[in-house]
Image (spheres, rainbow, N blue to C red):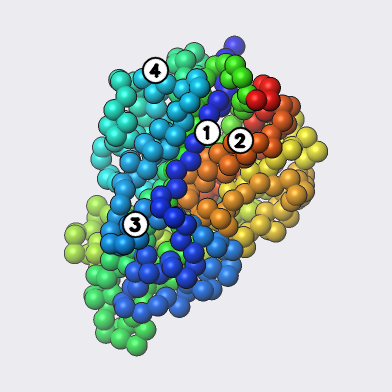
Amino acid sequence: MPHPVFINRVSAYLPHAPVDNDQMETRLGQVGGRPSRARNLVLRSNGITQRHYAIDPQSGLPSLTNAQMSAEAIRGLEGPGFDLRRLECLVASSASPDQVMPNHAVMVHGELGNPVCEVVSTAGICLCGVTALKYAYLSVASGETANAVACGSELASSLMHARNFEAELDSRVDALEQNPEIAFEKDFLRWMLSDGAGAVWLEAAPNAQGLSLRIDWIDILSFADSMPPCMYAGAEREGERLIGWSRFDGEARNRHSVMAIKQDVKLLNDNIVRVTVEQALERILARRPLSAEAIDYFLPHYSSEFFRQRLAVGLANAGLPIPQERWFTNLTRKGNTGAASFFIMLEELFNGGTLRPGQTLLGYVPESGRFSSAFLHLTVVGNQP
């Protein structure tokens, strides 16, 4: 039988002071020397009022690497019961690592400098934070390790800065003479994504004092068998297939901003709830005893307030109509931090003093890369401090 696994500490790291909507373009730069025409439209839709960037507010230069942010989040776990020197398994994942090779997690290990341990990174976009958590959970549950850290992080500002798009504008100067701006599928994401990291400490026993979260189950489903790519980077799309960055020479990669993050907004809007909520829950509810009445907190990761009501309808259609007064999200205050978002939500709730033993949490993390979905169920255990 697998061992029970408990989240005993949760930490989040958000770089620098919050950046409000009026400061965003100053921090990220103007593409083509002109204000974005998409920015205000996107911000009205997504409802985000502040976020964080790992960009020095004085110099405008990057101030931290992704690995450094992740290490800061993990160091934030320090406290009773946590000792980095006895860490046995480190799983750190990001959609925006600092390099293609070596993997993100070994770079985080290098920043931490803790003794030799198992180190793993999982690939993906928003969902890779949860796949990291599941690997860590299974490692402890199987008895392979006594403890583990799972970390999710994003350094979106490094990909969203205006300097990344100048070569594309220069190469299309004739066509864009009157309207020198990048395509909406790229510009849209510049005002959606931001930086941050979060981490959890897992053990096979709960905290001796205070509260812990028992991981009951984590279900992850991919619908790539029936859905085309929707969000991608390091590639260009031809029809429903992707042409990877290695098929382009250096000049062509710059000319087409191949390394930029792109998203098919129509494909996203038409399918994200139908697939990652309704179709996912149809499969999960067939094997999990789950009811809306039994869930005390619903922690949904969604990219924009635009999807909030759609998500509520999708839950109801799936037979899980969780009232919105039981939802917990900090999207509007802490931004869309992709793979870090669930950890950053969980940190605020876990350390906020409102949880009580016996309460249950349901997390939901979708990914539009090629439409994947995760639901995870946690139970509060222990005693009040």
Q: Are marks 4 and 2 in contact (CB under 8 Å)?
A: no
Instruction: Identify the amino acid type marked 1.
Output: Val
Would you identify the image quadrant in which residue 27 lies? bottom left
- Looking at the image, can residue 329 be seen? yes
The tag earlier along the polypeptide, 4 or 1, is: 1
Q: Are marks 4 and 1 in contact (CB under 8 Å)?
A: no
Q: Is residue 176 above or below residue 301?
A: below
Q: Which residue is mark 3?
A: 55
Report helix, strand or loop for mark 4: helix
Expressed as whole percent of the image width and height from the top left, the position of residue 70 reads 38, 39
Residue at image location 24% in from the left, 76% down from the top: 170
Q: Position of residue 249 (x, y in %)?
A: 19, 59
Residue 86 circle label: 4
Q: Earlier in the sequence, mark 4 or mark 2?
A: 4
**Marks 1 and 3, Cα distance to the nearest angstrom?**
25 Å
According to the image, label 2 marks what residue? 350
The residue to which callout 1 is attached is 10
Residue 135 visible in this rendered orientation of the protein: no
